Image: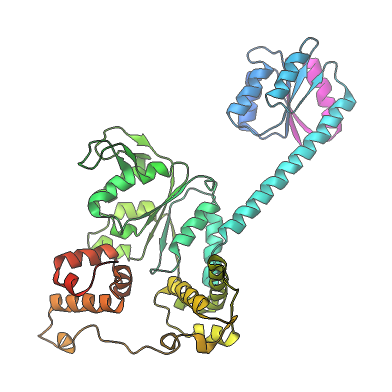
Amino acid sequence: MKVLIIDDERAIRRALREILEFEQIQVHEAENGKDGLELLRSNSFDLVFSDIKMPLMDGMEVLTAIQMEKIDVPIVMISGHGNVETAVQAIKQGAFDFIEKPLDLNRILVILRNVKDRNHLVEETQALKATVKKIKGSKIVGESPEIIAIKEMIERVAPSDARVMITGQNGTGKELVARSLHDLSNRAKMPFIEVNCAAIPAELIESELFGHEKGAFTSAVKDKKGKFELASGGTIFLDEIGDMSASAQAKVLRALQENVIQRVGGEKDIKVDCRVVAATNKDLRKEINEGRFREDLFHRLAVIPIHVPSLNERITDIPLLADHFLTLVCQEQGIQKKEFASEAKVELQKINWTGNIRELRNTCENLSVLKSGKTIEVADLDARLTQPAAVTPLVHPLALQPGVFDKEKNEKNLLKQALANAGGNRTKAAESLGISRRTLHRKLLQWPELEVEIKPNS
């Protein structure tokens, strides 16, 4: 135990020191409040004894400063004759206890025991909070070596403010990694703000990220805070960062370098304090080489890289994930709890999960709703899942013959087939093609005849 004594009377300091050292307690001294506060700022103490009346800075001022600076230490006020009322007032303001002069040995020993109990309780509470945070953050299901490595990385990195770049295919759970980083961080009680850069049109992305001033553009009828401001004190998750426009990239870079942003149409610098986590399904090195992504921004974002494997790269996790999703969906839908037969779990591991975890969850949801009994057997699995699907050529054979390759026609065929296979759902079509939804939208604007053939209602 480490104790600080703040008192201008040398005799009091000496008497208190003798009592404390007899109890095997490490003691530090200061003869006024100002020196005592400096020691508190630079050292960690388990307890402070402070006189009330002192030169330079009295005990009440020390108490106020400790609270203002959020120095977590119990303080016991030492009161002389005539200072009892002040000591009681100090208790009301947050002091742990008070003792009167002349010092009473038994009273001091009782205070020491109470402080030890208090500190032990604080430690237990902190440990419990850490455990709860750990449980809260362990939403990532899996025991494969790849997933265990990711969980360990998250636990190491989360407490810091280091920026993280998460890479992986669509549907692998990159957002889950980002949320776990936030949940296990010191910012967990503050906002987690997600921005899907691919889903926001290029002309609106800057307004979404940085906000805008009233009158900045036609529809800006009032001031609006951007995502960076809304994430103040917490975490901002920039999903699909590879789809961000060049001008937005430049502004994000400034925000990372200087911790300031400017709203669209504004001139005032606004300080921002948020951790930045980014994710992409693209090869950003390739994007940099082809001039679509800033190398300096990449280095600012990718301080800690985390790659999330595809579901096909972690097939040993599929039974665990299937059980997890089935239980979750049954709870959400309020239906009878169901389970997979062991043979069905084996069959699930044989499937080529191109949609990754997202596809597996959708499959579990489908099975939980359609299955009337409690156990899902192999026969309940859709035939298209349990058997290798015949690959439908997306390109006409002539398009692949030398000398007759038509790039535009090929792209149109690809888009048309992907949209048809997805039932007109643009998001699914884009995922099957390995492109962003925004890219697909741009292509459909370029070739409006495809809009006629496929209803653009998704």
- Front position in the image: 424 or 29: 424
Q: Residue at coordinates 38% horizontally, 68% vertically from top-left?
A: 170
Indicate yes or no whether the magenta region holds residue 19: yes
- Front position in the image: 69 or 458: 458
Compared with 253, 280 (above or below) is below
Q: Residue at coordinates 45% horizontally, 73% vertically from top-left?
A: 362
- The residue lying furthest to the left in this view is 403
Compared with 108, 209 (above or below) is below
- In the image, 260: left or right of 142? left
Please give the range of residues in magenta.
1-28
Q: Position of residue 248 (x, y in %)?
A: 27, 49
Q: Position of residue 104 (x, y in %)?
A: 88, 22
Instruction: Name the quarter where the C terminus is drawn.
Output: bottom left
Q: Residue at coordinates 74% horizontally, 31% vertically from top-left?
A: 3
On the question of residue 310 being in view, the answer is no
- The residue lying furthest to the right in this view is 106
- In the image, 96: left or right of 296? right
Q: Position of residue 44 (x, y in %)?
A: 66, 35
